[in-house]
Image (cartoon, rainbow, N blue to C red):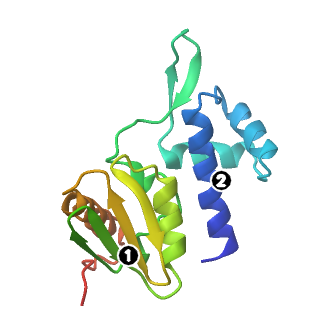
Amino acid sequence: MSINSQNVSARRAKAISLIKAGLIHSQTDLVDQLKKSGYRVTQTTASRDLEEIGAVRGRDGRGDSIYQISESSDDALSRVNPVPSKLILSVDHSANLAVVHTPPGAAQFVASSLDHANLTGVIGTLAGDDTIILVSKKSNGGAQLAKELLAFANAKNSRGHKAGRK
């Protein structure tokens, strides 16, 4: 993965964090906060990032305008871009674990993207060179987690190849 792709992913993950913390009321706020965090960003970039991560304008408890991100885990995997779905070669599961297979060297990047997606049903991830283990909060949640990861990989894979171990 290129440095640029990792920077985009990290910047968007930071934007999600700032929005969830209630700090972003405008695109200017996002630009300022990201710059304080060391990211090079313009108003255009901030606007694109807000669109890509699914941020919407809403009102906080005082009625002030604020950016928000839905807490639904259905979209969580697609919030951090660029989407690493083509790097998910296959997914398997057992009990509360889901195991993701990637090309050699890609597991840590994919795991980081999954971590930044703030999946609500995941306790954590562990990545090697080409394998990622995701631990579900539910004792039998591995199957559901694997199903979500496969659906994500299949839906986002522009070539239409079905993800699965060959």
Q: Is 104 placed above or below 90 here?
A: below
What mark, if any, has residue 61 been given in the picture? none
Residue under pointer 1: 88
Q: Is 107 placed above or below 118 here?
A: below
Residue drawn 48% across and 74% down? 127
Q: Position of residue 104 (x, y in %)?
A: 48, 88
Residue drawn 43% across and 58% down? 124
Q: Is 131 placed above or below 35 here?
A: below
Residue drawn 35% across and 74% down? 100
Q: Position of residue 114 (x, y in %)?
A: 46, 60
Is residue 138 or residue 13 the one in the foreground? 138
Q: Residue furthest front?
A: 139
Few, some or many residues within 10 Å of mark 1 (<14, 14–19, 20+)? many
Dots 1, 2 in contact, CB < 8 A: no
Horizontal arrangement in the rendering, residue 166 relative to residue 3 (left or right): left
Could you tell me which secondary element the residue under label 2 belongs to? helix
Residue 15: quarter of image: top right
Is residue 166 or residue 78 the one in the foreground? 166
In the rendered structure, which amino acid carries the disc numbered 2? Answer: Arg
Residue drawn 29% across and 68% down? 98
Q: Is 52 placed above or below 144 here?
A: above
Q: CA distance from mark 1 to mark 2?
A: 22 Å
Horizontal arrangement in the rendering, residue 29 relative to residue 91 (left or right): right
Give the mark nearer the N terminus: 1 vs 2: 2
Q: Position of residue 42 (x, y in %)?
A: 76, 47
In the rendered structure, which amino acid carries the disc numbered 1? Answer: Ile
Horizontal arrangement in the rendering, residue 135 relative to residue 118 (left or right): left
Is residue 3 or residue 117 the one in the foreground? 117
Residue under pointer 2: 11
Residue 160: quarter of image: bottom left
Few, some or many residues within 10 Å of mark 2 (<14, 14–19, 20+)? many
Quarter holding the C terminus? bottom left
